[in-house]
Amino acid sequence: MIRTREPLRLRHALVPLVCAIVISYFAYHAVYGRHGFIAWLSLQNHVDTLDQQLAEVRSAREQLDRQVALLRTGSLDPDLLDERARATLGFANPNDIVIFRDRSATGTAQQKR
């Protein structure tokens, strides 16, 4: 009975081949999978965008809080109240001098400078 070494070589190569396939599978999913590195980068980018939006909203809220604080009864600024009422209602005091400017003329004058 004569035996060849072929099946023995194949058997020795089979274990490393299976291990390489399993490692490749996990490496692929570690990079491109649902919870992989690429998904993590995308989430980090989204978090950075939301942090920037949060900072903008907080600054807008702080500005509104300052304006509201000026309108409270303890620190009511009559000039601010008068200015806001006139701007909102579109009224002017009879003693005020109102100058109407043509918006297209001011735009061209500023462009010439």
Image: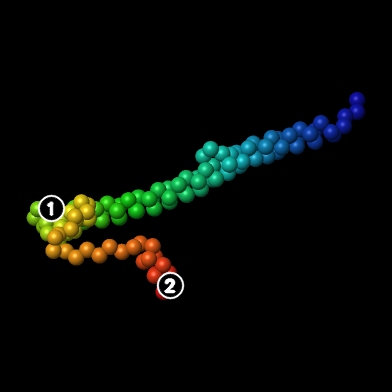
> What colour scheme does the image use?
rainbow
Q: Quadrant for the N terminus, please.
A: top right
Residue 69 visible in the picture? no
Give the left or right position of residue 24, taking residue 48 as reference.
Answer: right
> Label 2 belongs to which residue?
112
Q: Dot 2: what SS? A: helix
Amino acid type, callout 2: Lys
Amino acid type, mark 1: Arg
User: Is 94 situated above or below 13?
Assistant: below
Q: How many numbered badges does the structure rendering display?
A: 2
Query: Is residue 82 found left or right of 63 in the rendered image?
Result: left
- The residue at 70%/38% (across/down) is 16
Which of the 4 image quarters holds residue 63? bottom left
- Whether residue 28 sits left or right of residue 112 in the image: it is right
Q: Where is residue 14 shown, x and y percent of the image?
A: 73, 34
Q: Residue furthest left?
A: 74
Q: Position of residue 22 (x, y in %)?
A: 64, 36
Dot 1 falls on a residue whose secondary structure is: loop
- Asked whether disc 1 touches disc 2, contact meaning CB atoms under 8 Å apart, the reply is no
First in sequence: mark 1 vs mark 2: 1
Residue in front for this viewpoint, 102 or 31: 102
Which is nearer the eye, 18 or 66?
Answer: 66
In the orientation shown, which residue stands out farthest toward the top? 1
Quarter occupied by residue 32:
top right
Compared to 113, does 77 lie above or below? above
Residue at (51% x, 39% y) in the render:
35
> Where residue 81 appears, x then y in whole percent?
15, 56
Point 13% across, 63% down: residue: 95
- Of residues 89 and 61, the one drawn nearer to the viewer in this rendering: 89
**Front of the two marks 1 and 2:** 2
Q: Which residue is mark 1?
A: 72
Task: Tell me if I can see residue 11 in this picture.
Answer: yes
